[in-house]
Amino acid sequence: MRVAGYVREAADPAGDRPAFVQQEEIRRYAAAHGLQVVALCQDIRTPGRPLGREGYLSLLQVVSSGHAAAVLLPGIETLSSDVVVQEIMLWDLRSRGARVVSTYPADLEALSDAPSDPTRQFVRHILARVAEHGAAVAAATPGVPPPALDADAGVVIRLVSPSPAATDAAVG
Protein backbone atom coordinates (compact mmCIF):
# COMPACT_ATOMS: atom_id res chain seq x y z
CA MET A 1 0.00 0.00 0.00
CA ARG A 2 1.23 3.49 -0.85
CA VAL A 3 1.33 5.79 2.18
CA ALA A 4 2.19 9.39 2.92
CA GLY A 5 3.89 10.05 6.23
CA TYR A 6 3.26 13.14 8.33
CA VAL A 7 5.48 14.46 11.11
CA ARG A 8 5.06 17.57 13.22
CA GLU A 9 7.27 18.98 15.89
CA ALA A 10 5.56 20.56 18.86
CA ALA A 11 5.47 24.35 19.05
CA ASP A 12 7.29 24.03 22.39
CA PRO A 13 10.57 22.11 21.97
CA ALA A 14 10.56 20.89 25.60
CA GLY A 15 9.91 17.15 25.68
CA ASP A 16 9.28 16.96 21.92
CA ARG A 17 10.31 14.18 19.54
CA PRO A 18 12.31 15.80 16.75
CA ALA A 19 11.11 15.39 13.16
CA PHE A 20 13.96 13.02 12.25
CA VAL A 21 12.97 10.65 15.08
CA GLN A 22 9.34 10.66 13.88
CA GLN A 23 10.50 10.08 10.28
CA GLU A 24 12.50 7.05 11.38
CA GLU A 25 9.47 5.64 13.22
CA ILE A 26 7.49 5.96 9.98
CA ARG A 27 10.23 4.35 7.87
CA ARG A 28 10.67 1.41 10.28
CA TYR A 29 6.92 0.81 10.55
CA ALA A 30 6.49 0.98 6.76
CA ALA A 31 9.35 -1.45 6.18
CA ALA A 32 8.02 -3.89 8.79
CA HIS A 33 4.50 -3.82 7.33
CA GLY A 34 5.29 -3.79 3.61
CA LEU A 35 4.13 -0.21 3.05
CA GLN A 36 5.61 2.08 0.40
CA VAL A 37 6.23 5.63 1.63
CA VAL A 38 5.60 7.90 -1.37
CA ALA A 39 5.78 11.22 0.49
CA LEU A 40 6.92 12.48 3.85
CA CYS A 41 5.33 15.79 4.80
CA GLN A 42 6.52 17.69 7.83
CA ASP A 43 5.83 20.72 9.94
CA ILE A 44 8.99 21.74 11.76
CA ARG A 45 9.96 24.66 13.95
CA THR A 46 11.88 27.50 12.33
CA PRO A 47 13.51 30.01 14.70
CA GLY A 48 11.60 33.28 14.74
CA ARG A 49 8.51 31.89 12.97
CA PRO A 50 5.36 30.30 14.36
CA LEU A 51 4.88 26.59 13.68
CA GLY A 52 2.53 26.40 10.72
CA ARG A 53 0.63 23.68 8.90
CA GLU A 54 2.35 23.81 5.50
CA GLY A 55 3.32 20.14 5.78
CA TYR A 56 -0.25 19.14 6.59
CA LEU A 57 -1.53 21.12 3.60
CA SER A 58 0.99 19.28 1.42
CA LEU A 59 -0.25 16.00 2.90
CA LEU A 60 -3.82 16.91 1.89
CA GLN A 61 -2.63 17.53 -1.67
CA VAL A 62 -0.84 14.16 -1.82
CA VAL A 63 -3.94 12.37 -0.54
CA SER A 64 -6.39 14.32 -2.72
CA SER A 65 -4.34 13.63 -5.84
CA GLY A 66 -4.60 9.89 -5.22
CA HIS A 67 -0.86 9.30 -4.79
CA ALA A 68 -1.35 7.65 -1.38
CA ALA A 69 -4.09 5.37 -0.08
CA ALA A 70 -3.21 5.98 3.55
CA VAL A 71 -1.55 8.42 5.92
CA LEU A 72 1.01 7.03 8.34
CA LEU A 73 1.48 8.97 11.58
CA PRO A 74 4.04 8.48 14.35
CA GLY A 75 1.12 8.64 16.80
CA ILE A 76 -2.18 10.51 16.38
CA GLU A 77 -0.94 13.18 18.77
CA THR A 78 1.20 14.27 15.82
CA LEU A 79 -1.97 15.86 14.45
CA SER A 80 -2.73 17.72 17.69
CA SER A 81 -2.70 17.22 21.43
CA ASP A 82 -6.40 18.20 21.44
CA VAL A 83 -8.77 15.24 20.85
CA VAL A 84 -11.36 17.43 19.11
CA VAL A 85 -8.78 18.80 16.68
CA GLN A 86 -7.48 15.25 16.13
CA GLU A 87 -10.96 14.07 15.20
CA ILE A 88 -11.53 16.99 12.83
CA MET A 89 -8.24 16.29 11.07
CA LEU A 90 -8.92 12.53 10.95
CA TRP A 91 -12.36 13.26 9.44
CA ASP A 92 -10.74 15.57 6.90
CA LEU A 93 -8.24 12.90 5.84
CA ARG A 94 -10.88 10.16 5.69
CA SER A 95 -13.28 12.36 3.73
CA ARG A 96 -10.55 12.59 1.10
CA GLY A 97 -10.45 8.79 0.88
CA ALA A 98 -7.38 8.15 3.02
CA ARG A 99 -7.05 5.46 5.61
CA VAL A 100 -5.15 6.66 8.71
CA VAL A 101 -2.56 4.41 10.34
CA SER A 102 -0.43 5.04 13.42
CA THR A 103 2.92 3.57 14.37
CA TYR A 104 1.64 3.37 17.98
CA PRO A 105 -0.42 0.26 18.75
CA ALA A 106 -2.21 2.21 21.51
CA ASP A 107 -3.79 4.44 18.82
CA LEU A 108 -5.59 1.49 17.22
CA GLU A 109 -8.68 1.92 19.42
CA ALA A 110 -8.92 5.67 18.77
CA LEU A 111 -8.64 5.08 15.01
CA SER A 112 -11.30 2.36 15.01
CA ASP A 113 -14.79 2.93 13.60
CA ALA A 114 -16.27 2.81 17.11
CA PRO A 115 -13.91 4.39 19.64
CA SER A 116 -14.84 4.08 23.31
CA ASP A 117 -13.87 7.69 24.09
CA PRO A 118 -17.14 9.68 24.42
CA THR A 119 -15.49 12.87 23.16
CA ARG A 120 -14.37 11.12 19.97
CA GLN A 121 -17.85 9.62 19.54
CA PHE A 122 -19.52 13.01 19.98
CA VAL A 123 -17.19 14.83 17.56
CA ARG A 124 -17.63 12.09 14.94
CA HIS A 125 -21.41 12.31 15.32
CA ILE A 126 -21.34 16.09 14.81
CA LEU A 127 -19.01 15.83 11.82
CA ALA A 128 -21.25 13.19 10.24
CA ARG A 129 -24.25 15.53 10.61
CA VAL A 130 -22.25 18.41 9.11
CA ALA A 131 -21.33 16.19 6.15
CA GLU A 132 -24.98 15.17 5.68
CA HIS A 133 -26.04 18.80 5.74
CA GLY A 134 -23.34 19.73 3.23
CA ALA A 135 -24.45 16.95 0.89
CA ALA A 136 -28.09 18.03 1.15
CA VAL A 137 -27.22 21.66 0.44
CA ALA A 138 -24.99 20.66 -2.49
CA ALA A 139 -27.84 18.57 -3.91
CA ALA A 140 -30.11 21.64 -3.96
CA THR A 141 -28.63 23.02 -7.16
CA PRO A 142 -29.13 26.78 -7.62
CA GLY A 143 -31.41 27.63 -10.51
CA VAL A 144 -33.43 24.43 -10.19
CA PRO A 145 -36.93 25.16 -8.94
CA PRO A 146 -38.10 23.27 -5.86
CA PRO A 147 -40.53 20.43 -6.44
CA ALA A 148 -44.14 21.44 -7.05
CA LEU A 149 -46.40 21.40 -4.03
CA ASP A 150 -49.44 19.18 -4.05
CA ALA A 151 -52.46 21.50 -3.78
CA ASP A 152 -54.41 18.73 -2.01
CA ALA A 153 -51.78 18.37 0.71
CA GLY A 154 -53.04 21.44 2.56
CA VAL A 155 -49.72 23.28 2.52
CA VAL A 156 -49.99 27.02 2.05
CA ILE A 157 -47.03 29.34 1.83
CA ARG A 158 -47.72 33.04 1.66
CA LEU A 159 -45.04 35.71 1.83
CA VAL A 160 -46.30 38.76 3.69
CA SER A 161 -44.70 42.19 3.46
CA PRO A 162 -44.29 43.86 6.83
CA SER A 163 -46.33 46.96 7.46
CA PRO A 164 -44.42 50.27 7.54
CA ALA A 165 -45.15 50.58 11.27
CA ALA A 166 -43.66 47.13 11.96
CA THR A 167 -40.58 47.98 9.89
CA ASP A 168 -40.08 51.27 11.77
CA ALA A 169 -40.47 49.48 15.12
CA ALA A 170 -37.91 46.81 14.12
CA VAL A 171 -35.37 49.45 13.02
CA GLY A 172 -35.86 51.76 16.01
Image: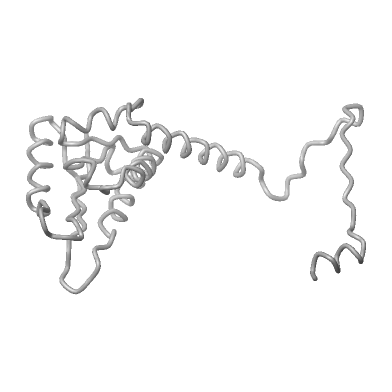
| Residue in view at x 29 percent, y 58 percent | 53
> Where does the image place residue 44, in percent across and percent down from the top left?
17, 60
* Apparent side of residue 144 relative to residue 92 in the rendered image (left or right): right
Q: Residue at x 42, y 38 (%)?
A: 123
Q: Is residue 22 above or below residue 33?
A: below
Q: Give percent across and percent down for residue 45.
A: 17, 63
Q: Nearer the viewer, residue 143 or 127?
A: 127
Question: In the rendered image, which quarter contains the C terminus?
Answer: bottom right
109 is higher (above) or lower (below) than 39? above
Residue 70 position within the rendered picture, expressed as x and y whole percent measured from the top left: 27, 37
Describe residue 171's horizontal placement relative to residue 100 as left or right.
Answer: right
Q: Position of residue 140 (x, y in %)?
A: 66, 43
113 and 28: which is toward the camera: 113
Quadrant where the N terminus is found in the figure: top left
Q: How did the renderer colour the structure? A: one colour
The residue at the point 22 percent across, 44 percent down is: 77
Q: Please name the residue shown 27% across and 62% down the image.
A: 52
